Amino acid sequence: MAATPQFGFHMPNHTFAGSPPEEEFDRLVELATTAEAVGFDMLTVMDHVYQIAGIGPETDPILEGHLLLAALAARTSRVRLATLVTGVTYRNPALLAKMVTTLDVISRGRAIFGIGAAWHEEEHRGYGFEFPPIRERMDRLEEACQIARLMFTQDRPSFEGTHYRIERALNVPRPIQPGGPPIMVGGGGEQRTLKIVARHADIANWFGPVAVLQHKDEVLLRHCEAEGRDPATILRTATAPLLLVEHERDAATALERIPPARHPFIPPGTPAQTADRLRPHLEAGYTFLIFRTVEPTTVAWVAMAGEVIRLLRQ
């Protein structure tokens, strides 16, 4: 029997036309609770302190990701909660494991530990975060995954790496989930990132059309073989930017509103058209898709995305 498709709702945009700052969180709650009601299985937010160029101007409002997830945990009841993804350079990994454990407790076992190697040099410079070369960031990512796993599963773990160390660290209360929150590594780098996925991750997150995902799968399979890891134990998720319209005649106009650099690889369309265009992902085995809009998110967009989910689950 084919796996039941699962779907995530990514919330990278915290800008709402006509809403004053004190109502910004209310709009995000409205989106999150609507997403849960229409069938989404997971909510994800970015972990950035500046808005990123692919979403909007860097001066656009953006809330801190882990605090936002904790607040949304108290307003939802079913969806999983994750950053997509936290940059390893932003926080000490032991503290980060404690934060995600706290989210797991608040949400009664719905947290996911999302992490990646970090890339946004400008916000590192602005906040005074160290931004080492990519090789070191990858080394830090691998050590962070190891520390998180230890703190999720052992009572008083110790670890000594090149960049991080813990000594008989306490993580009390324990995570609600047996074995702790799943570790999700974001990124498709074929030499290091996918090797780290094969060694340490429960979930991988990639981006792109089916052909790109299949290539990443082939590379991951080779790394799993080298590590003695069963690739079936790694959940592969794929992020899909969607431009949804109510009527087919509105597709061209909608695309004109978007700068060419933000055009989604899935053509704009109605929920029915979009479901048809996403079925090749499911047929190829990518049955956990994370949707995001390429425009400011609205409740109407979330409702249309819910219709895409309904059609793909038929």
Image (tube, rainbow, N blue to C red):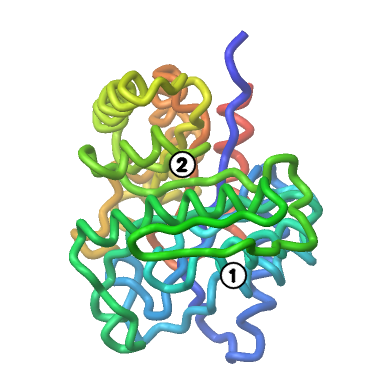
The circle on residue 270 is 2
Above or below, comparing residue 189 to residue 96 in the picture: above
Q: Residue at 33% x, 61% y: name it.
A: 162
Tell me where residue 280 appears, x and y as whole percent. 39, 22
Tell me where residue 285 appears, x and y as whole percent. 45, 20
User: Front-most of 95 and 215?
Assistant: 95
| Quadrant holding the N terminus | top right
Q: In this view, does 80 lie to the left or right of 12?
A: right
| Quadrant holding the C terminus | top right
Please, what is the three-letter code of the amino acid marked with disc 1?
His
Q: Residue at 38% x, 50% y: name it.
A: 142
**What is the C-alpha distance between the residues marked 1 and 2?**
33 Å
Above or below, comparing residue 132 to residue 104 in the picture: below
Please, what is the three-letter code of the amino acid marked with disc 2?
Thr
Disc 1 marks which residue? 66
Q: Counting residues from the N terminus, which is met first, the one under dot 1 or under dot 2?
A: 1
Name the front one of labels 1 and 2: 1
Q: Is mark 2 on a helix, strand or loop?
A: loop
Mark 1 neighbour density, 10 Å: few (under 14) some (14–19) many (20 or more):
many
The circle on residue 82 is none
Q: Residue at 70% x, 66% y: name it.
A: 72
